[in-house]
């Protein structure tokens, strides 16, 4: 079976069997729709042979499936898909999941392996992975380098992703180092999502999504929460994996 997570920035696909994940693919969302998608009467038709994927059961979740129905696919709500993926990948059953996506952030409280509550931040890009992308570009560094800065930060106060660029430029002129500014960016993002995490506390926190690939964000979160923060092995593909897990267990 195939799980597909139609994200705002990336489309993630996994092929999965009972033995585990067989293959995974990730695409820029716009490029994916242009190259492999076509609207037909039944919804969005995906060219599976063009992707080198088998014509098999398809399960869809994510940002895109709310506006585009995938032809022949079973649809899974995002919260359930991400929770199931995190349970499968971590073997934890009581935790809070932080999923930092391209344009939104989800915080999901899981008890007994099932989601019991959730909060989202989807009104401003300053609380999402897009903020990190923009700030890395302004600083002239890669996302990987930005993800290494967690100490000796300065406080950045702009609450808008656009105004934050102006603030960064002003701080560069004042002579602050890339390391200080990078750590400031990471702390600024964390401050926007920390209230959501603290409203849904757990003994363990798990990170998924593109933001989970940032060691700095994990360090900052663990330091503030004084609780272990786990990064999943396949954080970007967690939603797609969760789709398959739920169908394998006959939940959907």
Image (cartoon, rainbow, N blue to C red):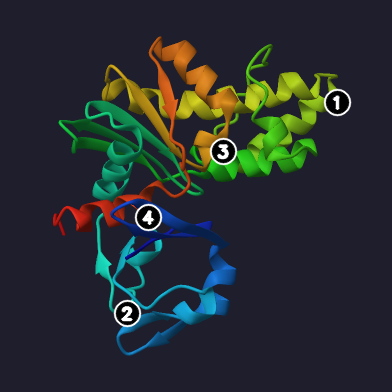
Disc 2 to disc 3, how far (Cα)? 37 Å
Residue highlighted by disc 4: 240
> In the structure shown, which secondary structural element does the residue marked by tag 2 occupy?
loop
Residue plotted at (14% across, 54% down):
251
Determine whether 54 is above or below 142 in the image: below
Front: mark 4 or 2: 4
Determine whether 184 is above or below 103 in the image: above
Front: mark 1 or 4: 4
**Badge 4, how many Cα within 10 Å: few under 14, some, many 20+?**
many
Disc 1 to disc 4, how far (Cα)? 43 Å
Residue plotted at (40% across, 9% down):
226
State if disc 2 and disc 4 touch (CB < 8 Å).
Answer: no
Of the residues under marks 2 and 3, which one precedes in the sequence? 2
Front: mark 1 or 2: 2
**Badge 1, how many Cα within 10 Å: few under 14, some, many 20+?**
few
Residue highlighted by disc 1: 173
The one of 37 and 163 positioned closer to us in this rendering: 37
Of the residues under marks 1 and 2, which one precedes in the sequence? 2
Disc 1 to disc 2, how far (Cα)? 52 Å
**Badge 2, how many Cα within 10 Å: few under 14, some, many 20+?**
some
Q: Quadrant of residue 159?
A: top right
> In the structure shown, which secondary structural element does the residue marked by tag 1 occupy?
helix
Residue highlighted by disc 2: 71
Of the residues under marks 3 and 1, which one precedes in the sequence? 3
State if disc 4 and disc 3 touch (CB < 8 Å).
Answer: no
Of the residues under marks 1 and 4, which one precedes in the sequence? 1
> In the structure shown, which secondary structural element does the residue marked by tag 4 occupy?
helix
Disc 3 to disc 1, how far (Cα)? 20 Å
Residue highlighted by disc 3: 160
């Amino acid at each position: 079976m195939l799980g597909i997570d139609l994200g705002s920035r990336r489309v993630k696909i996994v092929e999965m069997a009972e033995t585990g994940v067989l293959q995974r693919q990730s695409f820029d969302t716009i490029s994916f729709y242009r190259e492999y998608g076509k609207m037909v009467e039944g919804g969005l038709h995906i060219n599976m042979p063009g992707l080198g994927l088998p014509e098999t059961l398809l399960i869809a979740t994510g940002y895109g499936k709310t506006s585009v129905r995938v032809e022949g696919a079973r649809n899974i709500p995002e919260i359930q898909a991400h929770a199931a993926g995190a349970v499968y990948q971590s073997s934890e059953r009581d935790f809070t999941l932080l999923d930092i996506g391209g344009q939104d952030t989800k915080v999901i409280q899981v008890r007994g392996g099932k989601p019991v509550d959730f909060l989202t931040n989807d009104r401003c890009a300053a609380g999402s992975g897009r903020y990190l992308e923009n700030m890395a570009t302004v600083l002239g560094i890669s996302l990987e380098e930005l993800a290494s800065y967690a100490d000796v930060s300065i406080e950045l106060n702009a609450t808008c992703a656009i105004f934050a660029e102006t603030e960064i430029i002003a701080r560069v002129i004042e002579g602050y180092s890339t390391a200080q500014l990078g750590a400031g960016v990471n702390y600024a993002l964390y401050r926007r999502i920390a209230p959501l995490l603290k409203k849904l506390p757990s003994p363990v926190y798990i990170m998924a999504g593109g933001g989970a690939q940032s060691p700095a964000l994990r360090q900052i979160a663990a330091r503030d929460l004084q609780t272990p923060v786990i990064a999943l092995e396949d954080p970007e593909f967690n939603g797609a994996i969760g789709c398959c897990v739920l169908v394998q267990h006959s939940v959907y």
